[in-house]
Image: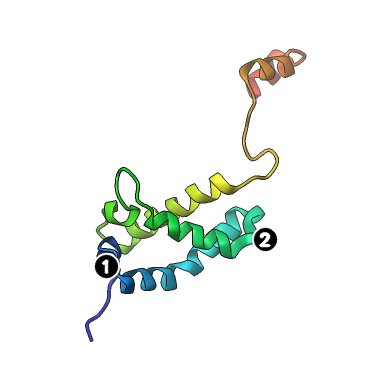
Amino acid sequence: MAIRTIFSMAEDCARGERQGWMEFVRDFSGIARSLLAHYFPALIPGMDEHVVAVFLRAAAKTPQGVWIATLKFSNEREFMMAFRDLVFAYGREQDRRPGAETGISLDQVRSVMTDLSLLERQLL
């Protein structure tokens, strides 16, 4: 039996082969779960669905192509950084905590800062 590496897994996934996707989901679902739970705790109640959605996003066809097929990496560390970016992008889109998005305009900031001294405004 040949040794399977992350490179062979990614190549199989890029070609749409079942074995590659099985290995990808098996080996990286725990990592996706841990990242989402740690950095996006608001997603914990529906965690199973969110983990599935991360892998569906990795397999989704975009104008650039399938995420894993467009990915260029020379070692496992680079692959993990790209996977982390994929998980974080998904988490940021799904995180619906109050205040998670900042919708503050410049006029609102100016109105809040009107009563502050020059030093306090500079600190802000």
Give the residue drawn at x 60%, y 53%: 40
> Secondary structure under badge 2?
helix
Give the answer, above or below, for where 11 lies relative to 105. below
Q: x, y (%) of residue 59?
A: 38, 57
Look at the numbered discs 1 and 2 and tell me whether their residues touch, using CB distance below 8 Å. no
Relative placement, left or right, of 124 versus 28 is: right
Q: What element carries label 1?
A: helix
Instruction: Please tell me which residue is depicted at 61% across the width and 47% down the height of the picture.
Output: 95
**Three-letter amino acid code at the position of disc 2:** Pro
In terms of depth relative to the viewer, which is nearer, 94 or 34? Answer: 94
Label 1 sits on residue:
12
Where in the figure is residue 32, as x and y percent of width and height? Answer: 50, 62
Q: Tell me if mark 2 has few (under 14), some (14-19) or many (20+) residues whose alpha carbon lies within 10 angstroms of its own.
A: few
Which residue is identified by label 2? 45
Q: How crowded is mark 1: few (under 14 residues within 10 Å), some or many (20 or more)?
A: many
Q: In this view, does 64 lie above or below 108?
A: below
In the foreground, 42 or 13: 13
Which of marks 2 and 1 precedes in the sequence?
1
Amino acid type indicated by mark 1? Asp
In the rendered view, does 6 fall on the left or right side of 97?
left
Which of the 4 image quadrants contains residue 108?
top right
Q: In this view, does 63 lie above or below 77?
A: above
Label 1, label 2: how many angstroms apart (C-alpha)? 32 Å
Is the N terminus in the top left, top right, bottom left or bottom right quadrant? bottom left
Where is residue 106, by image quadrant? top right
